[in-house]
Amino acid sequence: MSAQIHVSHPSEGVAQLLLDNGPGNFATASLHERLEEALSEVHRDGARVVVIGSAVDGVFVSHGHIGDIIGNLSGTGSPSGDPRSFLRVSKALDTGPLVSIAAMEGQAWGGGFNLALSCDFRVASERATVGQPEIMAGVTTAGEAARIVHLAGEAAAKRLLLDGRPVSALEAHRLGLVDRVVPDGEALATAVDWAQWLAGREPGDLAMVKDLIVGTRDSELTAALKRETALFVSKFSDERVVSRLWDVQRRYDEGADSYEAFGIPEA
């Protein structure tokens, strides 16, 4: 599994980062490490707005790679990198000086949706789906609950986290979790156009206003993220949970898609 980030600069002040991590574009520690490096690199190079998309057709980031997560948190597998890179990337996108736009062209579940939620804006194609299937495997989310409640309220969090089935981009937009829904194949271009508009502000102004907005945030979000992440990590000391997760990974390895692997009926 060789995670890569394809970096380009469509225009002055704008960076485009395309995630590339195998057919499913799963989130792994190594992918987050590469993304962390890329964010630092483009910021040093003068980017003010960053668009995060996918180099894999039909998917943004499927979700966290089950085997990689188990390897990092339970010690029963081989982790691909530093698991703390996930938290650092989320924090950098959420509170850092770069304004970020997620371009979601296809599936964005679990850790994939967490990455999108950490961004300032989300553009989704009509074929995109967002979801939190963790409950199907007996684990909690790793930050998504706090972010969804903060962005869209308790009702939206209950719909995704308790139900476990993904929702369409249009439903996610209705819930307040996606900013724009566009025709299939246009998410990245729309996000780049938006980024170019934003980057037209004077240097430093975007970071100044974003810092102002983040600074007004109730500290309860920070506390909620810490509490949720601690609960997520604690589940990996439960052998029954780890066994259920390995079953999900096994079904993937046997060729199942995400719906089949998690036991979610397709609508």
Image (cartoon, rainbow, N blue to C red):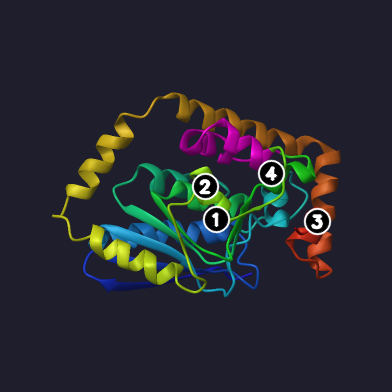
Residue linked to disc 3: 265
Q: Quadrant of the C terminus?
A: bottom right
Q: CA distance from mark 4 to mark 3?
A: 28 Å
Identify the magenta region. Answer: 140-161
* Label 1: few (<14), some (14–19) or many (≥20) C-alpha neighbours in 10 Å: many
Dividing the picture into quarters, in which one does residue 169 lie?
bottom right
Position of 29 with respect to 163 (left or right) is left
Confirm whether the magenta stretch covers residue 120.
no
- For discs 2 and 4, the disc positioned in front in the rendered view: 2
Q: Which residue is mark 1?
A: 170
The residue to which callout 2 is attached is: 174
N-term-proximal mark, 4 vs 1: 4
**Amino acid type of disc 4?**
Leu
Residue 75 in the image: state x and y as whole percent.
Answer: 74, 46
> From the viewer's perspective, is residue 231 above or below residue 23?
above
Q: Are marks 2 and 1 in contact (CB under 8 Å)?
A: yes
Instruction: Note whether 107 is above or below 157 in the view shown.
Output: below
Position of residue 9 relative to residue 32, above or below, is below
Mark positioned earlier in the residue sequence (4 or 3): 4
| In the depicted structure, whether residue 185 falls above or below residue 177 | below
Element type at marker 2? helix
Q: Quadrant of residue 48?
A: bottom left
Q: Which residue is mark 4?
A: 73
Q: What residue appears at the point 73 percent right and 61 percent down from the top-left corner?
A: 258
Q: Amino acid at mark 2?
A: Arg
Q: Secondary structure at mark 1?
A: helix
Q: Which numbered disc, 4 or 3, marks the residue closer to the eye?
A: 3
The residue depicted at 63 percent of the width and 56 percent of the height is 63
**What is the x, y in percent for residue 123?**
44, 59
Q: Mark 4, residues whose alpha carbon is within 10 Å: few (<14), some, or many (≥20)?
A: some
Do callouts 2 and 3 mark residues in contact (Cβ within 8 Å)?
A: no
Residue name at image x 57 percent, y 55 percent: 112
